[in-house]
Image: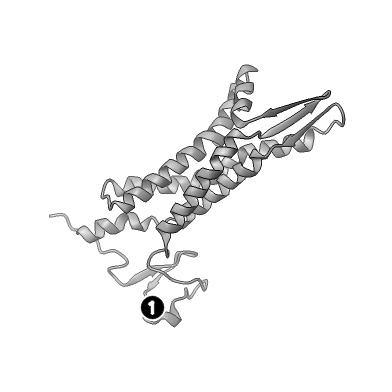
Amino acid sequence: MKVHAATARQLGLVSCHDCHLLIEKPLSHAHRRCPRCGAHLHPRKPNSLARTWALVCAAILFYIPANVLPMTITSALGTRQADTIISGVIYFMQSGSWEIAMVIFIASVFVPFVKLLILIFLLLSVRFRSAWRPKDRTSLYRLTELVGRWSMVDIYVVTILVALVKLGAIATIEAGPAAVYFAAVVVVTMFAAESFDPRLIWDVIEEDV
């Protein structure tokens, strides 16, 4: 017979969301603050699923114009050319810069899309009380936390180009409207990952023991 170790909640302990101090669960509402950092204490993040769903839906809405609208607008010798993220990737591929094309595609298209898919998968698995491979699902969540900020690489590239290519009437590069939406996707998905409580994955396991 497999013996399961007692969880922190079963032992009457609660973890601080900010500094991760593990302390005894306070008895009164007036003392529900972390003694180390002063943050409010909760056994689980309040309204975690609802807030994460709202942020994920907002990120999906931002993701569409981020990939459809121009990311950069180039003016050279009286001509203007608008490039989306995908058209920029295609340009670098055609010019032989496969490494740059892969970096931009992975960081700006693939990673945000996969991160949204992972968050939706985790939300649905908790909603339907799935007990399937909780360790792997927790690892997926940690991965979304880790890679989220690196999706800003395309914004960094645009910022550098705008700052460097200022040749007056000869050539200029401006940030397109997609830059705002893309930055919103990255920031909102980071907040979504932060609002999701991975301990919800394990609650169904604990209740079934």
Q: Seen in the image, is 55 located left or right of residue 100?
A: left
Nearer to the camera, 33 or 94: 94
Give how far across and how far down residue 77 sits, in percent: 83, 23
Q: Residue at x 71, y 39 (%)?
A: 159
Residue type, mark 1 in image: Pro
Q: Seen in the image, is 40 located left or right of residue 10?
A: right
Within 10 Å of disc 1 (Cα), the crowding (few <14, some 14-19, many 20+) is: some
Give how far across and how far down residue 196 sits, in percent: 43, 55
Q: Secondary structure at mark 1?
A: loop
Q: Residue at x 36, y 80 (%)?
A: 27
Q: Residue at x 44, y 71 (%)?
A: 41
What's the colour scheme? Answer: one colour
Q: Residue at x 73, y 37 (%)?
A: 160
Nearer to the camera, 59 or 109: 59
Q: Image quadrant for the N terminus? A: bottom left
- Residue that numbered label 1 is attached to: 26
Q: Seen in the image, is 83 located left or right of residue 123?
A: right
